[in-house]
């Protein structure tokens, strides 16, 4: 049998009993004859706790020192899980990201994996051990510890599955797969048996708490198909089945869905630059400055402004993460003096609601159906953008949940209906 890579998130190892349950699940898989490489996140809310500890010292901590601090959470998990496996008589060894061969660039807090030297992992597997790897972390060329950004343990697992040519990759969380909407907001949301790379990428970008974006990008790049499962489900040795959502390159013919899911992102800010000169190079100047500041933007729309004595003008609107708002405004205000008469407006009382599906582009009337659902609830749309498989609308934050439920019901996603009505 081949190698199976499993990843367990923080909620899966939040208590001693959960460590024991995870250990039993790993032991069962080991008994089936597989070699196991297990990636683990920091337990429970430890990462958030560490961030708060840093804030108690300084509001502007060094990114390098934050990586040193935050990487300790995963080291707690790997050691405890190894101990839990030892208690079951299962040989296991814990490895930090650097010990496991993860090499990254030097972009602290959001490093990218450059290479994985799998020699140590393969040596431990050959000795019959379960290899437990600290997710979320690596080592740069300067010998410094780096972290891969929130959710980075998913990327660690996907990358290992690719480098080890694993037979299977399983991502265990506290939910049993990917749903058509957040079940906490939409009680009728249904679990998807499978979803494509492109769909889950768009859902993650739209605010759905499903997978880290970069981890899915890695999966798509290396062709790693994986499954999202629940670590809280009954254990196999208790008669439970491992049922979740398969993330694949292309949906099977038996799943001809138009829309797969609805997502909401309430942590966004809307910025509009009003009265910019309508001439070539202006948009480049603005977005180059924002890009240099490493601010990710979304929902970019340019419209014709009101002409003035200085010639025609244009308004540019975009959204960004609310956490980036202060920096984005600082960047915009630093550029505006180059364009006399222009000004910047912003709004944080907004939310982005999106539908995602591989059939959006190839079926007529999808956008109209979404807009109809919002209109029926009296929800005004303030901004609209789209792609081949996604349509996003900006609405008032107070109406976000109602908007998600209305759109979810309109497309009958609780039934995962394959055809439009």
Image (cartoon, rainbow, N blue to C red):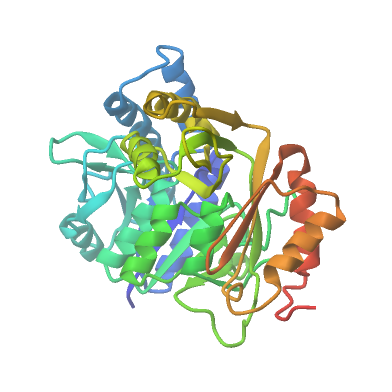
Q: Position of residue 197 (x, y in %)?
A: 47, 68
Q: Quadrant of residue 80?
A: top left
Horizontally, residue 395 falls left or right of residue 389, namely: right
Q: Residue at x 76, y 47 (%)?
A: 401
- The front one of 178 and 127 is 178
Q: Position of residue 67 (x, y in %)?
A: 31, 31
Q: Residue at x 72, y 73 (%)?
A: 416
Pick out the residue farthest to the left. 142
- The front one of 169 and 367 is 367
Q: Position of residue 13 (x, y in %)?
A: 51, 44
Q: 371 above or below 315?
A: below
Residue 376 appears in the rendering: yes
- Which of the image's four quarters has the C terminus? bottom right
Q: Residue at x 38, y 28 (%)?
A: 335
Horizontally, residue 280 falls left or right of residue 101, namely: right
- The front one of 236 and 87 is 236
- Which of the image's four quarters has the N terminus? bottom left
Q: 138 above or below 126?
A: above
């Amino acid at each position: 049998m081949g190698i199976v890579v499993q990843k367990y998130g923080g909620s899966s190892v939040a208590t001693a009993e959960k460590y024991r349950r995870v250990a039993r699940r790993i032991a069962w898989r080991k008994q089936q004859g597989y070699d196991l490489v297990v990636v683990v996140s920091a337990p429970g809310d430890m990462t958030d706790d560490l961030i708060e500890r840093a804030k108690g010292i300084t509001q502007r901590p060094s990114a390098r020192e934050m990586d040193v601090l935050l990487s300790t959470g995963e080291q707690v998990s790997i050691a405890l899980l190894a101990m839990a496996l030892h208690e079951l008589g299962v040989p296991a060894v814990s490895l930090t990201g650097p010990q496991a061969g993860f090499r990254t660039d030097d972009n602290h807090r959001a490093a990218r994996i450059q290479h994985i030297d799998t020699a140590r992992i393969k040596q431990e597997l050959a000795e019959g051990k379960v290899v437990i790897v600290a997710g979320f972390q690596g080592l740069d060329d300067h010998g410094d510890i780096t972290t891969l950004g929130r959710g980075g343990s998913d990327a660690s697992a996907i990358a290992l599955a690719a480098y080890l040519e694993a037979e299977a990759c399983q991502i265990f969380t506290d939910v049993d797969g990917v749903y058509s909407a957040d079940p906490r907001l939409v009680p009728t949301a249904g679990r998807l048996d499978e979803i494509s790379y492109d769909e889950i990428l768009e859902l993650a970008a739209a605010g759905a708490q499903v997978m880290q974006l970069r981890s899915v990008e890695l999966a798509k790049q290396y062709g790693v198909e994986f499954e999202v499962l629940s670590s809280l489900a009954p254990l196999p040795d208790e008669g439970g089945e491992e049922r979740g959502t398969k993330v694949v390159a292309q949906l099977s013919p038996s799943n001809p869905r138009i829309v797969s899911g609805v997502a909401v992102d309430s942590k966004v800010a809307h910025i509009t630059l009003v009265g910019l000169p309508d001439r070539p190079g202006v948009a480049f100047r603005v977005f180059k400055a924002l890009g240099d500041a490493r601010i990710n933007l979304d929902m970019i729309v340019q419209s014709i402004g009101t002409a003035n004595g200085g010639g025609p003008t244009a308004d540019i609107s975009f959204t960004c993460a609310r956490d980036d708002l202060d920096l984005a405004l600082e960047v915009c205000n630093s550029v505006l003096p180059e364009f006399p008469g222009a000004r910047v407006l912003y709004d944080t009382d907004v939310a982005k609601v999106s539908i995602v599906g591989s059939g959006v582009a190839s079926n007529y009337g999808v956008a109209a159906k979404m807009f109809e659902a919002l209109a029926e609830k009296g929800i005004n749309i303030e901004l609209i953008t789209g792609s081949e498989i996604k349509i996003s609308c900006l609405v008032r934050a107070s109406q976000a949940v109602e908007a998600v439920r209305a759109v979810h019901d309109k497309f009958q996603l609780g039934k995962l209906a394959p055809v439009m009505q």
